[in-house]
Image: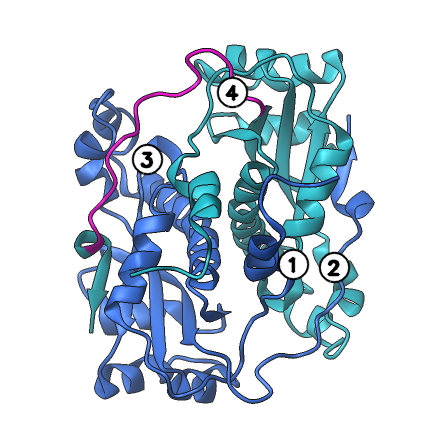
Chain colours: A cyan, B blue
Amino acid sequence: MSLALDAAAQDLLFREAQTANTFTDEPVTDEQIQAIYDLVKFAPTAFNQSPLRITLVRSQEARERLVKHAMGANGPKTLTAPLAIVLSADLDFHEKLPRLFPHAPGVKDAYFSELAVREVAGMQNATLQAGYFILGIRAAGLAAGPMTGFDFGALDKEFFGDGKQKSFMVINVGKPGEDAFFPRSPRLEANEAIATI
Amino acid sequence: MSLALDAAAQDLLFREAQTANTFTDEPVTDEQIQAIYDLVKFAPTAFNQSPLRITLVRSQEARERLVKHAMGANGPKTLTAPLAIVLSADLDFHEKLPRLFPHAPGVKDAYFSELAVREVAGMQNATLQAGYFILGIRAAGLAAGPMTGFDFGALDKEFFGDGKQKSFMVINVGKPGEDAFFPRSPRLEANEAIATI
């Protein structure tokens, strides 16, 4: 069964790409991140709500504040990556809905007037966008090291003091360094993940 | 700024792909879904927990049980798609961790003995995998129509009576039909989504 996506692209995004644990010193530029964003921004979210926010941790001082909240080996890994990125959901995404979903401007007030609803929808859709973004990093020829082992409540207080963003993932980005990859772990067989009713 | 991913692949996955609202009659085969799965299964999840479960709603009877729980226009759309798929998180994903994460078999008991923890982690990682899966559908030359406007609590009772799976998305899949696409809605500019600290 052949796919429409060419084999080289399949390898780049999925088959040969792996989570990187070490990186070279080569910098990751703002232009690279912008090119990734300008590609993956087109992938879908509910009502086009687009809640994902991407915080590039560039200064040494900010990097140190970030790793204070890392668990286990995530701290040292994050200190040595050329770029660390915090992904968060904007809980005020509804303010932009009249522009992002212009054919139904009433959606903002009909569905998203309550913070608790926005928190669930925003986290779900930002997580979906995180999946697109990880593949976008690979599309740029870079390796991603996504991590959820952080104290995100503390991170929100550290970086998003106004309470309007909820972080949920940190991604180290760069060119893979020495011994960057663990051996590929097994995946579930198709018949374990797929059922028919 | 050019990406490593070739332009045709960028178009196929992101720039020219859009959420489809109508479909042709052309069937979507089990082989196509398996090929999609066998590609996107390699994308990362935390501890390789791989909680996403993919339920192909093939029988007319199951399709009717599905659309009972759809909101608004999602019901009629879902009735006419060649294939409707329910995505869910397996809340017992931890049972497979010793096989999926063999270098640290203790993770299962150290982190995932509690259902409440598995529910949060499982939903987050299955949602990440949903992002990969939507792009995988496009990689197969098919159009995806992902929807979150369903009563998922009722859907779980309908299809996953044992309480071990939590559904969160339904995706219509097929070749786009007549007037399949709404005009592309605006996206946030890079400087609205990306910040630097």
Which residue is label 3 attached to?
A: B48
Mark closer to the observer (4, 1):
4
Q: Which residues are magenta?
A: A174-190
Image location (x, y in percent) of residue A34: 74, 40
- Per the rendering, the mark at residue A42 is 1
Mark closer to the observer (4, 3):
4
Q: CA distance from mark 2 to mark 1?
A: 7 Å
Image location (x, y in percent) of residue A165: 68, 41
Residue at image position (42%, 75%) is B172
Dot 1 falls on a residue whose secondary structure is loop
Amino acid identity at mark 1: Phe
Image location (x, y in percent) of residue B93: 24, 43
Mark closer to the observer (4, 2):
4
Q: The residue marked by circle 2 belongs to what chain?
A: B
In the rendered view, tell whether residue B135 sits above or below residue A172.
Answer: below
In reply to whether residue A183 is colored magenta, the answer given is yes
Q: The residue marked by circle 4 belongs to what chain?
A: A
Q: Are marks 1 and 3 on the same chain?
A: no
- Per the rendering, the mark at residue B187 is 2
Could you tell me if the residues under marks 1 and 3 are in contact, i.e. CB atoms within 8 Å?
Answer: no
* Dot 4 or dot 1, earlier in sequence: 1
B186 left or right of A150 in image: right
Q: The N terminus of chain B appears in which quarter of the rendering?
A: top right
Q: CA distance from mark 4 to mark 2?
A: 31 Å
How many numbered discs? Answer: 4
Residue at image position (20%, 70%) is A196
Dot 2 falls on a residue whose secondary structure is loop
- Per the rendering, the mark at residue A176 is 4
Q: Are marks 4 and 1 on the same chain?
A: yes
Could you tell me if the residues under marks 4 and 2 are in contact, i.e. CB atoms within 8 Å?
Answer: no
Could you tell me if the residues under marks 2 and 3 are in contact, i.e. CB atoms within 8 Å?
Answer: no
Q: The residue marked by circle 3 belongs to what chain?
A: B
